[in-house]
Image (cartoon, helix red, strand yellow):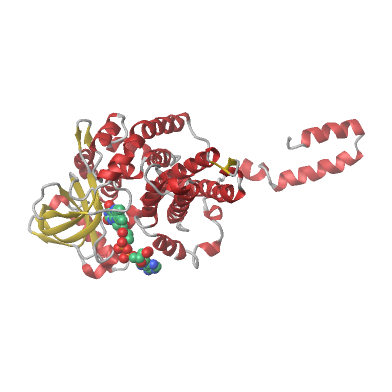
């Protein structure tokens, strides 16, 4: 399907419903959960009743061939509150890992356990990062060893969203330490499994409505069928890795989810930007609204342009993911890098524009400032996104921009006679030659016909 900026009626309706929910349900609860630093169960339940919290809702959005449903939805929800938004979306990140690494049977069996239903809400977590390092995924230490009909997990995970309170935790663990990321596999650990413990809940700068924890795994035994995918498939993957082929399941999940993290960051960027513009239009100093000073307006202008640029990158990457177009130039990382950095700048500028009021919790901008910073850290720091894009410079970027590498449309007529074609150029030249010899009236008519319109 071709990339388009034209939203369908379904997209408009999704945006309207998500925005209304963000404005009427999420925003009013944001300050409370930021202070309490607790999981907002009632809001998750309300989202579930609204149809915004279920595996089928996500499956439906991911199936949208335009790729736009999910980023449109996420931007609105995170506009409401990033911490509450993260709680709502963490099961979808775990679902993405289950979908990538698991069998269809595992997906059907476990996906409902990750979300629950209204009145019986469930949560899921994706546990990859470890205390000794999150960026260097090849250096993960949590081990998974097969023992009879069970897998035994041992190790530690940290900064895990919904960690310790999730009904289902997808854990990335090392099966063969010699093979780096390719020697890892994903395991599904249900709540209450002996050996999996929450060590502590982490006290965070922002996103405080999302529960984040450190987990330990000590002789944590799970049935063999809770390895995601089959053992045959794992052995095949390990054999391939020993021959230097294949890819990591965790890194594959991150590639898919980065444009989605970009959409989340855009929600915070837009909330901050809109608030700053509104405040600066109402706040008066030296006899007029402060927005009339270029010193106030110009930074907001740059942010307006950067938010739109980041959104276009996000939509492009989402469209590519939906249409199976590979990220040759690190397009997923580009979208996350730009959206996260504009979110930080927009929130900082919102604090600046609001002056002293921006620095105290009477206004929401100080919270957005704390929330925004996470986007340059999780799901790959900004430095890691630059590394991913950097790896393409010598091999792919030298071949030219992305659209040179996209498969062309081979419909002959458009190729031969479409706008900018040689045939049209030649016809135009012939027309001009003829026109020079034509009487004035005919010339005027020809000019009207040839005009591209005003
Ligand atoms: C609130 C929150 C929620 C999170 N949720 C989850 C979750 O649900 N599941 C999960 O698995 N993880 C989660 N994470 C972990 C997150 O993904 C990691 O924190 C992140 O990947 C960075 O890893 P690190 O903290 O170990 O930093 P490190 O890897 O120790 O990096 C430290 C610094 O060095 C830089 N750096 C490292 N290597 C290089 C290099 N080669 N070149 C240049 N710079 C480099 C990094 O960019 C960073 O600035 C979460 C983190 C936070 C804060």
Identify whether 348 is placed above or below 115: below
**What residue is rendered at 32% in x and 53% in y?**
205
Residue in front for this viewpoint, 169 or 291: 291
* Image x and y of residue 5, in percent: 53, 39
Identify whether 186 is placed above or below 291: below
132 left or right, relative to 389? left
**What residue is rendered at 46% in x and 58% in y?**
328
315 left or right, relative to 150? right
* Image x and y of residue 321, in percent: 41, 48
Residue in front for this viewpoint, 280 or 275: 280
Identify whether 40 is placed above or below 198: above
Residue 147 appearing in the image: yes
Identify whether 19 is placed above or below 185: above
356 left or right, relative to 419? left
Residue 135 appearing in the image: no
Q: Quadrant of ligand 1?
A: bottom left
Name of the residue lying farthest toward the bottom: 178
* Image x and y of residue 122, in percent: 20, 39
């Amino acid at each position: 399907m071709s990339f388009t900026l034209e939203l369908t009626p379904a997209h408009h309706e999704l945006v309207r419903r998500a925005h209304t929910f963000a404005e009427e349900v999420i925003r009013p609860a944001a300050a409370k959960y930021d202070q309490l630093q607790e999981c907002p169960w009632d809001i998750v339940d309300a989202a579930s009743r609204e149809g915004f919290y279920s595996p089928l809702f996500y499956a439906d959005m991911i199936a949208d061939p335009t790729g736009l449903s999910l980023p449109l939805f996420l931007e609105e929800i995170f506009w409401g509150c990033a911490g509450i938004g993260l709680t709502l979306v963490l099961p979808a990140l775990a679902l993405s890992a289950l979908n990538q690494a698991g069998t269809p049977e595992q997906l059907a069996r476990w996906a409902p356990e990750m979300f629950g239903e209204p009145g019986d809400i469930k949560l899921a977590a994706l546990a990859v990062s470890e205390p000794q390092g999150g960026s260097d995924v090849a250096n993960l230490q949590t081990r998974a060893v097969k023992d009879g009909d069970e897998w035994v997990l041992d190790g530690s995970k940290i900064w895990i969203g919904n960690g310790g309170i999730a009904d289902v935790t997808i854990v990335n663990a090392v099966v063969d330490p010699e093979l780096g990321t390719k020697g890892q596999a994903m395991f599904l650990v249900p709540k209450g499994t002996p050996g999996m413990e929450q060590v502590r809940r982490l006290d965070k700068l922002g996103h405080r409505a999302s529960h984040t924890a450190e987990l330990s795994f000590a002789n944590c035994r799970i049935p063999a069928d809770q390895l995601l995918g089959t053992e045959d498939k794992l052995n095949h993957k390990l054999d391939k890795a020993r021959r230097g082929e294949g890819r990591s399941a965790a890194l594959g999940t991150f590639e898919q989810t980065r444009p989605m993290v970009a959409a989340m960051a855009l929600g915070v960027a837009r909330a901050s930007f809109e608030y700053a513009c509104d405040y600066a239009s109402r706040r008066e100093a030296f006899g007029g609204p402060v927005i009339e000073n270029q010193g106030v307006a110009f930074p907001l202008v740059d942010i307006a342009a950067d938010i739109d640029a980041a959104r276009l990158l996000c939509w492009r990457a989402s469209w590519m993911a939906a249409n199976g177009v590979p990220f040759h130039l690190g397009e997923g990382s580009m979208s996350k890098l730009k959206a996260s950095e504009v979110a930080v700048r927009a929130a900082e500028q919102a604090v600046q524009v609001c002056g002293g009021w921006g620095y105290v919790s009477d206004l929401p901008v100080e919270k957005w400032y704390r929330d925004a910073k996470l986007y340059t850290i999780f799901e790959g720091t900004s430095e890691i996104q630059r590394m991913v894009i950097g790896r393409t410079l010598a091999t792919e970027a030298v071949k030219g921009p992305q659209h040179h590498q996209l498969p062309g449309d081979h419909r002959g007529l458009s190729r031969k006679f479409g706008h900018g074609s040689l045939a049209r150029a030649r016809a135009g030249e012939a027309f001009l030659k003829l026109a020079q010899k034509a009487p004035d009236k005919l010339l005027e008519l020809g000019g009207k016909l040839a005009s591209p319109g005003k």
